[in-house]
Image (cartoon, helix red, strand yellow):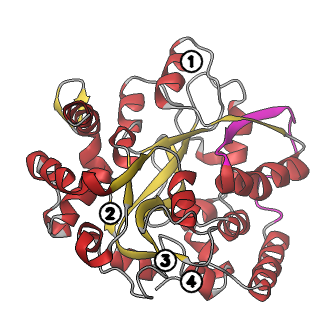
């Protein structure tokens, strides 16, 4: 069972470790020596955005002199249009593994400039490594979150507990299917119906929508933003909900989550083709992937560090709350983003198909 609150002593220990690491790594290739200028990056909003600002944006400006300008998270469609118009709206794009193959295929991303990175930083990226066009930025998970009091202190074994309405009582919530792989509602529906994790893919569409038919009468709302499930749990409107682990990490202490059958995946950074601040974009990525920066980021919210060396800078209690910690990986399920990005029909990925089927299902059940 995961206790989401942390003591001030733990925070003090982590901050001391991070400060020591920053001193040790200060000469690692990102200090100012060239032009300053600016770099345009995402503000993820909420606890994610705050962690980005404190761990990456402000320290990068202090260390390099480069001004960090933020824009709200850029959705793939808007990003694609801006690149095609030769006016990318951002220099460092947050991307999912499902979207990247199309961007790469269509020549919309800039190849990674490995000379901008400390080799030790690239070597530390684990379990996902840098590719030709991108680096992992963080690890996240869709977890089963619940009100501890309502469950009498019992940790759910998996999503079948979510579907067992008679045993748990109370309402529940899942992500809207329009979020696709980011919301994980489709594999969750099969897990709730008893499908073993090893048998999830390819998804059985008919079975998963029958499973959703069963749970829909008990759904208070299909959430569309990360703060909604936390609020519904805090307000006691639901007993259980799927949620992004980084949001639950900052919730009230009665709200818990389990790594059992969590759906994990990585987020990525890439530089759009034609980015106006290309050099500073790679400098920013190299800086933000340093172990000290990654540890500070993960201290401030529940998203796991892309650089595994950062886990050693966190307290054991804090590291255990990361989705790429050994304990979490042993109990969770990989989101299989390669399958989601596959096109069984020309021009339509499995992620596209999922959204199309979801919209038809919602229309039938309106």
**Foreground mark, 1 or 4?**
4
Magenta residues (range): 26-45
Task: Answer with the quarter of the image where residue 82 lies.
Answer: top right
Residue 209 image offset from top left, x and y in percent: 16, 47
Residue wearing tag 4:
3
Residue 262 in view of the camera: yes
Considering the numbered disc 3 on the image, is that residue within a helix, a strand or a loop? loop
Residue 299 image offset from top left, x and y in percent: 69, 71
Q: Residue at x 27, y 44 (%)?
A: 340
- Label 1 Cα crowd, 10 Å radius (few <14 / some 14-19 / many 20+): some
Q: Earlier in the sequence, mark 2 or mark 1?
A: 1
**Tag of residue 325:** 3
Task: Answer with the quarter of the image where residue 196 lies.
Answer: bottom left
Look at the image and tell me in which quarter the C terminus lies: top left
Measure the C-alpha gap from mark 2 to mark 3.
Answer: 13 Å
Considering the numbered disc 1 on the image, is that residue within a helix, a strand or a loop? helix
- Label 2 Cα crowd, 10 Å radius (few <14 / some 14-19 / many 20+): some
Q: Residue at x 59, y 78 (%)?
A: 4
Q: Is residue 118 left or right of residue 150?
A: right
**Tag of residue 82:** 1
Magenta stretch encompasses residue 33: yes
Residue wearing tag 2:
334
**Foreground mark, 2 or 4?**
4
Measure the C-alpha gap from mark 3 to mark 1.
Answer: 37 Å
Measure the C-alpha gap from mark 1 to mark 4.
Answer: 43 Å
Measure the C-alpha gap from mark 2 to mark 4.
Answer: 23 Å
Q: Earlier in the sequence, mark 3 or mark 4?
A: 4
Q: Is residue 234 above or below residue 342?
A: below
Magenta stretch encompasses residue 332: no
Task: Report the magenta stretch's main SS.
Answer: loop
């Amino acid at each position: 069972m995961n206790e989401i609150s942390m003591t001030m002593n733990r925070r003090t220990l982590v901050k001391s470790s991070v400060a020591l690491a920053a001193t040790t790594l200060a000469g690692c290739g990102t200090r100012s020596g060239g032009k300053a200028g600016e770099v345009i990056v995402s503000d993820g909003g909420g606890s994610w955005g705050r962690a980005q600002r404190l761990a990456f944006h402000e320290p990068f400006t202090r260390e390099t002199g480069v001004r960090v300008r933020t824009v709200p998270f850029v959705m793939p469609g808007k990003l694609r249009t801006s690149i095609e118009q030769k006016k990318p709206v951002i220099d460092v794009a947050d991307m999912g593994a499902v979207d990247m193959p199309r961007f790469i295929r269509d020549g919309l991303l800039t190849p990674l400039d490995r000379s901008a990175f400390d080799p030790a930083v690239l070597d530390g990226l684990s379990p996902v490594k840098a590719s030709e066009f991108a680096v992992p930025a963080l690890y996240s998970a869709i977890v089963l979150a619940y009100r501890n009091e309502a469950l009498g202190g019992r940790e759910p074994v998996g999503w079948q507990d979510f579907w067992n309405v008679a045993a748990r009582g109370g309402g529940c919530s899942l992500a809207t299917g329009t979020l696709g792989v980011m919301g994980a509602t489709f594999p969750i529906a099969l897990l709730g119906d008893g499908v073993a994790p090893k048998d999830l893919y390819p998804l059985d569409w008919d079975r998963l929508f029958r499973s959703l038919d069963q749970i829909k009468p008990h759904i208070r709302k299909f959430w569309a933003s990360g703060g909604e499930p936390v609020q519904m749990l805090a307000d006691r409107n639901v007993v259980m909900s799927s949620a992004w682990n980084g949001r639950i990490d900052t919730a009230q202490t009665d709200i818990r989550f389990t790594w059992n059958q969590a759906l994990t995946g990585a987020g990525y950074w890439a530089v759009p083709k034609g980015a106006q601040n290309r050099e500073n974009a790679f400098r920013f990525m190299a800086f933000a992937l340093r172990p000290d920066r990654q540890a500070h980021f993960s201290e401030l919210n529940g998203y796991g560090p892309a650089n595994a060396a950062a886990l050693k800078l966190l307290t054991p209690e804090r590291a255990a709350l990361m989705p790429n910690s050994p304990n979490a990986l042993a109990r969770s399920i990989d989101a299989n983003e390669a399958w989601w990005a596959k096109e069984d029909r020309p021009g339509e990925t499995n992620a596209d198909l999922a959204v199309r089927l979801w919209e038809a299902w919602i229309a039938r059940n309106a």
